[in-house]
Image (spheres, rainbow, N blue to C red):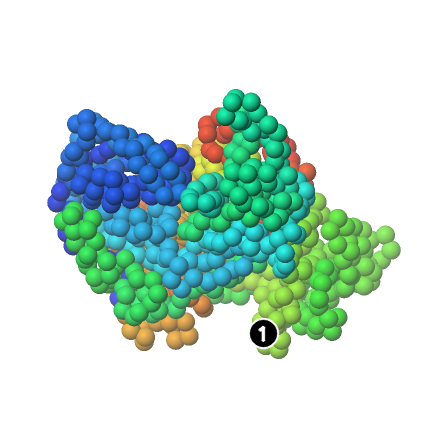
Amino acid sequence: MALASTVPLGQRRPLAVYANAFDVTQIPVKAYEQYDVMTPDVENVRWRHRILERLQNHEAPKVFRLCLFDGKSILYSAAPLDLPDGTSGNYTLTVPGKGRVTVKVARVAGETVTFDDLKNFLNGKISDQTPKVSVALNLLQFIIRQAPNLKYPNNGRAYFTSGGSKDLRGGLQLFRGFFQSVRPAIGRVLVNVDISAAAMYKPGPLLDIALEVLNLRGNARALSYKKHSKEWNILSQFFRNVLIDIKLPKKTVTKKVVGLVEAAGRFPFTQEQEDGSSLPTTVAEYYYKTYNIRLAFPDIIGIELSRGSGKNTVIPAELCTVAAGQRYTRKLPQNMTSMMVDFSKFRPEKRLEMIVGQKGDRVQPPTLEYATSPYIQDAGMKISEQPIILQGQLLRPPTIFYGKKQPAASSFPLVDYSLRLDQNVIKGFMDTLEQCCISRGVRAKPSYKRGSGVGSVDRDIKEACSLALVSAGAPPGYAKPPEIVLVILPQSAADIRQDVKRAGDVTLGVGVYTREDNIAKFTGRQLDQYCNNIAIKINARLTGVNSIPSSPAYDWFTKEDFMFFGADVGHPGPGIQNKPSVASVVFSYDRHGVKYSATSRVQQPRQERIGELGPMVYDAITRYGKVNGKAPKRLIFFRDGLSEGEYAGVGELEFQDIKEAVKRVWAEVKLNDSPPLITYLIVGKRHHVRFFPMTAQDGDRKSGNVEAGFVASEGIANPIAKDFYLLSHGGILGTSRPAHYIVLKDENFNFDIRPIQEVAYTLCHAYKVCARAEYHFDASLRYMDSDCATVTSTSSSEKGSFNLSQWRSGYAQTHSSMLARMFFA
């Protein structure tokens, strides 16, 4: 095993920064009792919070006044509750919009929750995060989140308010809010607070929202769609599981949408009479006779509220209003994603001001309410009003050596699917790209072909390749296709993009892509820079080397034969259970760590552990051996996507899978060399830790962000794991997000995180890679078609019935000619 003292390190200088974390200066002194809360409509967090609010403020305030609720089924109280039956009790209450409901509250047998073990854990007297420590940390989460979660729409971790909201159109709007989370550190507990945002369903008359979703202006009579029409499918998906208020004389009830009904006013059903007989009627007749409501639009769609026993509950859409305060949890449409990004961006100084409440804003941060929260006060908990200061270091940027120029084919085709680009603009783009390629040694002149459209991509590319060969002066009968095809995609590119990327990655083995809006918006120097970026990609696809990074620790590690690995699992969208997850692994195969290949596998939906990691690592090491004629001696494995609760379980199992793969290779090849030393790290990006310069002079002059290369661990490090935060790139807009590295296993550096920091930072200057597995599925499986997604609950029976074999058989591996070409870059 390598000794840390033998690894040379580059220069670094100290730098202090603010972090968006606040010290818990006093941990709660009270002990808490735990209770189970059994409520109706258990799938709906909104209703459960509403029920608890009624108990606390209206029905039984003396019993439940300062209880802490997790939004699911757990209730904590700092004193035993005075329940009717001693340890349990039933409460029947009226909830606006829901009616009469019954709630059962029962004491959970077991020990009282205290914070003694948490204190010992923070001070190093307990080395593991025991169940008692985890429960105490969760209880702290409830204490700080309880007040805002009872008042505002939330997802448990963040809450959102309408202050400063933005209209997205399409039936949606954006809310600002705040994320807050309790995090343990060495010797302290921190509250991480950050700006957050959420897409919300726009409240209002359902007819107006439906017209907006379809981008229609005019009369509601246009909503007379037939079942399974395009518009029907769009509205059905949009409104599924949305809560609506149904306004009737003298009352309003709130219900969940199950589906749509065509011509709802004409919908026939049988109405039971007082004498036990039944008469046929329609929805329109029922509302007129019962409520004296005459429907204005009996021929348009309506809302279906329930199914079962062959009966439907149908409500005319004109009587429905979309209830306020509902989060939109599906993937945002492509045209709204950029609006969400813009809405969420703040320069670092503005972001910090909003978090600590230094300047007025429409949304008041939780940091201003910690001192007055009744739940925090009752717990005896205190939180600092000032953000913490971290003592970190600024790593010296690595040296970059530019690769040798690589010869390439003398022509490559450009296939144009743009809808609005002028031919002069395209010619200017082609000329600039040609010059940028030449400057990098890629002597290739683009040849032009207009693409036909969806369904003809393979034919278009093949014809374009033939034209390129003629343009390059290839002799008759020469059939080798160009190694690169450049495709211009339209701005709304979903269908074409899917066909093009599948053709490039799987069926034909060629391809580089750009979008018409990128070409249209750049001129002069900006166009030159954009074309240079494309030229870099082209060079990489031709197995050329753009640049080679170097730093002392990186050079020490790469003196021995080595491999870098990166792995992640991509999951289907929220609530979708009929699509698989895809695990992808990329790995280096050259002596500089700048050329990568990739492999991927299909697995069960939402399975986080990479089920076939062993075979994937086996394939990677075998491929490395074929290219280099020898085995690697050092491996670093960067694992993306694991949550804190999966570090020990999934991380340990995957490390053993890597070990077993190495063992299998060594046994089959009969190697006498020692197996490679392995370092296994988890890289987290979905966190809310941010850094802020303490003075303007300490930050980047343009963006105001902390400079790239800043690394921190002291003051924010995990008590039980070697970890650090690294700002690998300089942010241009908004506030830079550091990557969080957690070192689970380390046989190369003996858990000295300094050289690991340097190697990680140096690697960030090599060419990036990512998975493109979604384009590898057969089109008949409709993997990328969101309209076919079956949104269901996640019961074990549904998971067990998932047909993985059909997805595996319909999943194509990467074209053999692309394996060494950085096709995923």
Q: How many marks?
A: 1
Return the x and y of residue 598 as percentages of the image width and height. 56, 45
Return the x and y of residue 670 as percentages of the image width and height. 50, 31
- Asked if residue 805 can be seen in this view, the reply is no
Q: Look at 34% across and 48% down and name the residue there.
A: 157
Residue most extreme to the bottom: 524
Q: Is residue 713 left or right of residue 198?
A: left
Q: Quadrant of the C terminus?
A: bottom right
Residue most extreme to the top: 276
Q: Look at 26% across and 53% down and name the residue there.
A: 191
Return the x and y of residue 148 as percentages of the image width and height. 30, 52
- Image quadrant assignment for residue 520: bottom right
Residue most extreme to the front: 275
Q: Look at 59% across and 77% down and name the residue there.
A: 525
Q: Nearer the viewer, residue 458 or 748?
A: 458
Residue that carries the numbered disc 1 in the rendered image: 526
Please, what is the three-letter code of the amino acid marked with disc 1? Gln
- Image quadrant assignment for residue 450: bottom right
Vertical relation: 357 (above or below) 79? below
- Asked if residue 292 can be seen in this view, the reply is yes
- Image quadrant assignment for residue 112: top left
**Element at label 1:** helix
Q: Nearer the viewer, residue 443 or 380?
A: 380
Q: Quadrant of the N terminus?
A: top left
Q: Look at 22% across and 34% down and name the residue there.
A: 34
Badge 1: how crowded within 10 Å, few (<14), some, or many (20+)? Answer: few
Q: Is residue 530 left or right of residue 178?
A: right
